[in-house]
Image (spheres, coloured by chain):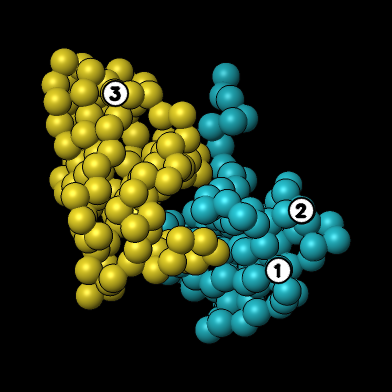
Chain colours: A yellow, B cyan
Amino acid sequence: DTEVTQTPKHLVMGMTNKKSLKCEQHMGHRAMYWYKQKAKKPPELMFVYSYEKLSINESVPSRFSPECPNSSLLNLHLHALQPEDSALYLCASSLGVANEKLFFGSGTQLSVL
Amino acid sequence: GESVGLHLPTLSVQEGDNSIINCAYSNSASDYFIWYKQESGKGPQFIIDIRSNMDKRQGQRVTVLLNKTVKHLSLQIAATQPGDSAVYFCAENILGFQKLVFGTGTRLLVSP
């Protein structure tokens, strides 16, 4: 299995909702990432997990809460989001934790109303 | 009016031409570079990578060139095909940091 799988593919939520984005990989990768991508812009790093521990938080607002239940799964919990948080949320994984190519999922297109 | 910031640089080529996409990076401590291709509605797809101890690397129909002196990276695509139409991003990893930073991207349009 050489895929990073993200669910759901699309999500519409209100500003008072709580939702979660899910990401799964079965490649034995030890690092997992969340990126945010606005239209016509490059992906921007949000969080990095190495060996199931949070190693980088790029000053992301607390309304985004990551979780890594095990080495294959990565979640992003969403609460009280703003309309400007609407974007494509990409999950990625890499075999090692530095200087390794990232494999990306297809993303979750999130719309906050 | 339109904001310049909303438009990606675009390279338009004819099918069969060779394409060259350029990228300038800013950090001289970057030691690993990747080119990604992103099609509409999909995540970035790995194309080719290069480490800072090399200046050229070739793949199938693609070549990456690295010029550390001027901090420049390029992606050459031979015999460009309509299926190559996508947005191409360069990305750099800064030595000592577990962090891949993406460039602004270039849209490649291939016409038959």
Tag 2 and tag 1, C-beta contact below 8 Å: no
Rounded to the nearest whole Å, what is the CA distance between mark 2 and mark 1? Answer: 10 Å
Callout 1: chain: B
Number of numbered tags placed on the structure image: 3
Residue at point 57%, 51% (across, down):
B97
Callout 2: chain: B
- The crowd level at tag 3 (other Cα within 10 Å; few <14, some 14-19, many 20+) is few
Secondary structure beneath dot 3 equals loop
- The crowd level at tag 1 (other Cα within 10 Å; few <14, some 14-19, many 20+) is some
Secondary structure beneath dot 1 equals loop
Q: Is residue A93 visible?
A: no
Image location (x, y in percent) of residue B112: 49, 69
In the rendered image, the vertical position of residue A75 relative to residue B36, given as above or below: above
Rounded to the nearest whole Å, what is the CA distance between mark 2 and mark 3? Answer: 35 Å
Residue at point 17%, 37% (across, down):
A20
Rounded to the nearest whole Å, what is the CA distance between mark 3 and mark 1? Answer: 38 Å
In the rendered image, the vertical position of residue B46 relative to residue B5, given as above or below: below
Residue that numbered label 3 is attached to? A63
Tag 2 and tag 3, C-beta contact below 8 Å: no
Q: Amino acid at mark 1?
A: Ser
Image location (x, y in percent) of residue B96: 61, 55
B40 left or right of B34? left
Secondary structure beneath dot 2 equals loop
Residue that numbered label 1 is attached to? B52
Circles 2 and 1 on the same chain:
yes
Image location (x, y in percent) of residue B18: 64, 74
Residue at point 21%, 34% (across, down):
A77
Q: Quadrant of the N terminus of chain B?
A: top right
In the picture, the disc for residue B104 is none
Q: Earlier in the sequence, mark 2 or mark 1?
A: 2
Residue that numbered label 2 is attached to? B28
